[in-house]
Amino acid sequence: MTGHVTIRNLSRSFGTFAALRDVSLEIPAGELVALLGPSGSGKTTLLRIIAGLDLPDAGQVLINGEDRIARHPRERGVGFVFQHYALFRHMTVGENIAFGLRVRPRGERPTRAEIRSRVATLLDLVQLGWLIDRYPSELSGGQRQRVALARALAIEPRLLLLDEPFGALDTKVRKELGAWLRDLHHGTAITSLLVTHDQEEALELADRIVLMAQGKVEQVGTPAELYTRPATPFVLEFLGEANRLPCRLGEGGAAILAGTGDVLAHGLEPDHPLARSGADVTLYVRPHDLLLEPEHEGPVVITRVRMAGAFAKVEALMQGISLTALMPFHRLGASGLREGEHARLRVLHGTAFAAEGVEHPAALRFEARGVTVPA
Ligand code: ATP
């Protein structure tokens, strides 16, 4: 059975420090949900409370509608895989996976044959059948985490909690295991909660992302929702690099670069209260949404061009503002962009938020209509 988790008004302080502040959340059954956020934002604290390893000062954790706070961790039907939650060193792979079943009270314990068959099935699932008799010290880091996952699944949890399970592994293995976990998750219909501070991992793997900051939930949504409709500048910047262009709003919803008459973009909703006020906004533009093209007297000066894998990263300055643009590396040669040369710029897409100090909570989003500066 899978678990639907409801978290209601959860708070937890350590001394005077509030690690969780009135967090409420729904985690639908069967989803793979990433808890994403910077270090210290409260992700692990939340996971530990759901697991029953820590108690909140206030609030409730309901699994399938039932309050679980008072229950012993073992009775919550929760499996864990933590980065540093080591396997038992003196037990083989098979014994490690069987452990959770062997320690069950007599009435609930499966027979030896049943345990053996369950272990074999789980080892097949994590594709490590051939390692059943090895000891943890004889495995690679990635294999160890897969065994840890099989061990967590052995008790048939309704909820699987993963705290940076691949944090200690190199990028390639981390990516492989991530993709593998996603497939595994979809095959088992378990509800999984994955703590990570890696936005790429969350965007790639999760059905839904819970983005946390300073003990609070900043935004909840699918990866596409968070990426394309960030609720706050924090969400936008946490999910990937962005250029920040200080602008003033002009006639008809134009974004005009501060201190110039240059219109960078059209399309801001003209009826938006901010647009009418001629307010200061920050226009956020992702590096791949910023086009630079050589132009003799252009306002942009290219300061650095370098290769970043499949992309060329072009760094530049305009009116003292640092800019970064990304383009497929194979296009760099034909683009004519070189260090020290001038260029014009075009914003393909951007999101505007009220500049700091301007009272307005709403985001202004628009698809820019290909404005080139200078026109
Ligand atoms: P990371 O990605 O670094 O693991 P996190 O988002 O998981 O961060 P938590 O581990 O939940 O963050 O910690 C949130 C805050 O609570 C941190 O500032 C941390 O120092 C504090 N904290 C956590 N556990 C304790 C504790 N047992 N005693 C005192 N402070 C704690």
Image (cartoon, rainbow, N blue to C red):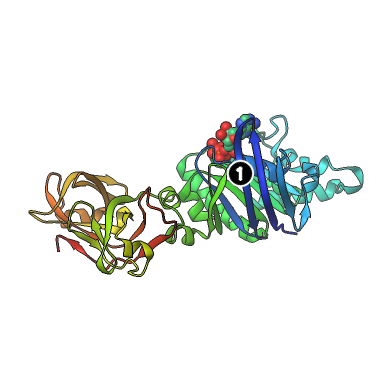
> Ligand 1 is in which quadrant of the figure?
top right
User: In the rendering, at what x and y percent does residue 281 appear?
Assistant: 32, 55
- Which quarter of the figure is the C terminus placed in? bottom left
Q: Quadrant of residue 94?
A: top right
Residue placed farthest to the left in the image? 296
Residue in the picture at 46% in, 45% down: 172
Amino acid at circle 1: Arg
Q: Where is residue 34 shown, x and y percent of the image?
A: 56, 51
Q: Which residue sits at x=49%, y=41%?
A: 38
- Residue at 67 percent of width and 41 percent of height: 48
Quarter of the picture holding the N terminus: bottom right
Q: Is residue 128 visible?
A: no
Q: Residues within 10 Å of mark 1 (few under 14, many from 20)?
A: some
Q: Looking at the picture, tell me which residue is in the foreground, 367 or 328.
A: 367
Any part of residue 104 in sight: yes
Residue 110: image x %, image y %?
85, 49
Outermost right residue: 107
Using the image as rendered, state which of residue 209 and residue 109 is in the foreground: 209
Q: Secondary structure at mark 1?
A: strand
- Residue 183 vs 88, above or below: the answer is below
Depicted 127 relative to depicted 17: above or below: below
Q: Is residue 244 left or right of residue 153?
A: left
Q: What residue did someone put label 1 on?
A: 21
Indicate whether 148 appears above or below 334.
above
The total number of labels drawn is: 1
**Residue lying at 61% horizontally and 60% vertically, measured from the top left:** 186
